[in-house]
Image: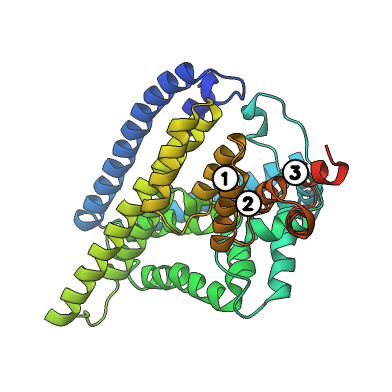
Amino acid sequence: LAVFAASRAHALTALDAKLAGAQTEGHRLAGILVLLALVGASLAAVLALAERRMTPSLAARRAFAVAVAAVVAAAFAGGVARFGAPWTAAHHAWRSFAAPQKDFGNDLNSRLFQLSNHGRLIQWKAAAHQFEHAPVVGTGAGTFEVWWARHRPQGIQIRNAHSLYLQTMGELGIVGLLLVLGIVLVPLMAAIRARRQPLVPFAAAALAAWAVHAGVDWDWQVPAVTLPALALATLVCNAAPGRALRLGTEARIGMAAAAVAIAAFGLVAGIGNQALADSNKALDGQNYAKADQQAKRAARWAPWLAEPWIIQGQIDALGQDRTTAERDFRKAIAKDPHNYLAWYGLAGVTHGDARREAVAEVEALDPLSDEAKELRTGS
């Protein structure tokens, strides 16, 4: 029902939709999803209550098993009649998945029941090659975007490999992959032990769905998707039988202090990221004074970012202050040597060996970028 309701929202399924229409339909769809979630939770609670109060007879359980087997057999027979033998259907499914990417136009609904990989195979191969380069500890967190820019076979710009496990392998090696698998498999094993507890099967099913889908998309960067999955993981671990782990006072204080520190860092990072977004928006609108002000604010609140210094360098270059612009771009490079835009900016405000070095870095970091092409042609 949720998928059907979403597919009927034109402004949410068309690339050329207007923002106002998307907002209106998004609010309506949000209400429908909340209602369906409440219905699903209510049905789960009713079933849990029924499990406590009702004990089906042996004959009823056998009849139910026969009915389920009959439904499965009928579905299998229908699938064979429609798609052929299992191996034939699997072959056709793989051919459809591995086929070159299709142009689905503006209607995103046309992709709903398509098995096209939509470019994922190329991205997965890139992550696998990144893993082969540094299989133990990887090349570093967040470096897939850099690796892709260096080695991409086509000009599309992406940040994620569309697979939690493959991207973790590439960025953090086998060590990081084992840690991620532990986060996923430990709760699922706990759910098996606690499978007779009310609601645990439902929680485990939702967690398993997230774990599978995270293998083919970047769910882990969507808090509304991943935080519920982590909450379900906590629930099933807590429901598993066994000796309870009781923390002492010092451990509780330490965990509370860590939680406060993490929350404070999140707040600071959020302020810095918002200032950076405001700076980019002002820069696009040619409001250079505001863009510079917000970039400086972002640099104060998020001093690890290179982007605020790139923006300041661009503004100083526009003002013909090449000396200050060079200083800004070099600060950006010091914070992120793999940022080809910082090197591109440096190439625009320097001469001689410094410019040649900057051009070479742009070529090495992102050879298919428009900036690299511009530097090659001298335009």
Q: Residues within 10 Å of mark 2 (few under 14, many from 20)?
A: many
Query: Residue 144, image x and y in percent?
Result: 64, 60
Mark 2 or mark 3, earlier in chain? 2
Residue sitting at the far right = 377
Task: Rate crowding at label 1 as few (under 14), some (14 to 19) or many (20 or more) other CA atoms within 10 Å.
Answer: many
Marks 1 and 3: CB-CB under 8 Å?
no
The residue under label 1 is 313
Element class at badge 1: helix
| Element assignment for label 3 | helix
Residue 107 percent across, percent down from the top left: 65, 24
Name the side, left or right, on which 261 lies relative to 106: left
Q: Is residue 31 above or below residue 324?
A: above
Q: Quadrant of residue 198?
A: bottom left
Nearer-N-terminus badge (1/3): 1
Location of the C terminus by quadrant is top right
Quadrant for the N terminus in the image: top left
- 150 or 72: nearer the eye? 150
Badge 2 amino acid: Ala
Q: Position of residue 208 (x, y in %)?
A: 47, 59
Q: Which residue is mark 3?
A: 371
Q: Which residue is mark 2?
A: 342
The amino acid type of the residue labelled 1 equals: Gly
Amino acid type indicated by mark 3: Glu
